[in-house]
Image (cartoon, rainbow, N blue to C red):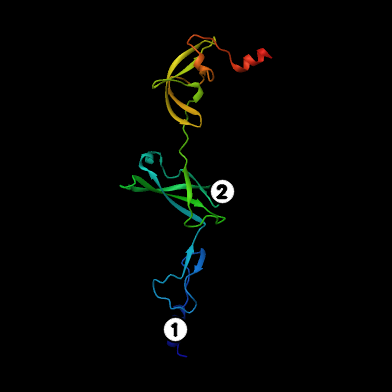
């Protein structure tokens, strides 16, 4: 067989071979054996799920709290109790004028291939930690729009001090002004207290009774 003819046959055979452009997991075949395949025909799905790219929307009010590199945690109903951790990679340059939200993308390592494209995930973006002075909510006395706490002096006498509060979380409240780190405050029974009253620590009182 002439060499030109052999090259032609090889070219025709190569046209009948379909090679995947990357390594991945092949889905169900979407054509039947013997069918004519034309450009644009959908043969099967191919997914590289070793690393999941997760896109989700965040309200524009939270944009200042977003930054590439922040930890991200996702939970799937298919795997309850097993969080998937990743990193926030990109923040879109535009805000959707209808939803007033910005699209962000996170990457989640998926070595066991438990996550699959199209799954519904609940996402939590962790903010960078910051030091804060916090008190139990029970330690605050609310009078109108003002907040107060009872600070305990060295002699056990209490003084009512005005405080400015910030964020609240799980029964605790952030104190922005009015108290300093190391101050002792009354946590329980503040409704019955009056400025100038004397108190003793609960542990000391219990020891005295014992």
Is residue 46 visible in the rendered image? The answer is: yes
Instruction: State yes or no: discs 2 and 1 in contact (Cβ < 8 Å).
Output: no
In this rendered view, identify the residue nearer to me: 3 or 175: 175
Which numbered disc flags the more N-terminal residue, 2 or 1? 1
Residue at left 43%, top 76%? 37
Q: Is mark 1 on a helix, strand or loop?
A: helix
The residue lying furthest to the bottom in this view is 1
Residue 172 place in picture, x, y as percent: 50, 28
Image spot of residue 108 (x, y percent): 50, 51
Where is residue 14 drawn, in percent x and y? 46, 78
Residue occupied by mark 1: 7
Q: Does residue 77 lie above or below 37 as drawn? A: above
Residue nearest the viewer, comparing 186 with 18: 186
How many residues crowd around disc 1 within 10 Å: few (fewer than 14), some, or many (20 or more)? few
- Residue 53 vs 44, above or below: the answer is above
Q: In this view, does 86 lie above or below 37?
A: above
Quickly name the residue at label 2.
Answer: 80
The picture places residue 88, in percent across and down from the top left corner, at 45, 47
């Amino acid at each position: 067989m002439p060499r030109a003819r052999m090259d032609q046959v090889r070219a025709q055979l190569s046209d009948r071979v379909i090679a995947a452009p990357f390594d991945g997991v092949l889905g169900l075949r979407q054509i039947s054996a013997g069918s004519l395949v034309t450009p644009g025909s959908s043969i099967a799905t191919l997914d590289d799920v070793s690393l999941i790219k997760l896109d989700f929307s965040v309200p524009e009010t939270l944009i200042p709290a977003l930054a590439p590199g922040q930890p991200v945690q996702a939970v799937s109903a298919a795997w309850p109790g097993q969080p998937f951790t990743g990193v926030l990679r990109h923040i879109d340059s535009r805000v959707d004028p209808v939803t007033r939200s910005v699209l962000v993308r996170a990457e989640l390592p998926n070595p066991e291939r438990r996550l699959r494209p199209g799954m519904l995930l609940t996402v939590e973006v962790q903010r960078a930690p910051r030091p804060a002075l916090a008190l139990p909510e029970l330690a605050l006395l609310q009078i109108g729009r003002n907040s107060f706490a009872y600070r305990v002096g060295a002699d056990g006498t209490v003084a009512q001090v005005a405080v400015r509060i910030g964020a609240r979380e799980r029964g605790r409240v952030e104190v922005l002004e009015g108290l300093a780190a190391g101050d002792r405050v009354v946590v329980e029974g503040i409704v019955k207290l009056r400025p100038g009253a004397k108190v003793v620590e609960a542990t000391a009182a219990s020891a005295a009774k014992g």
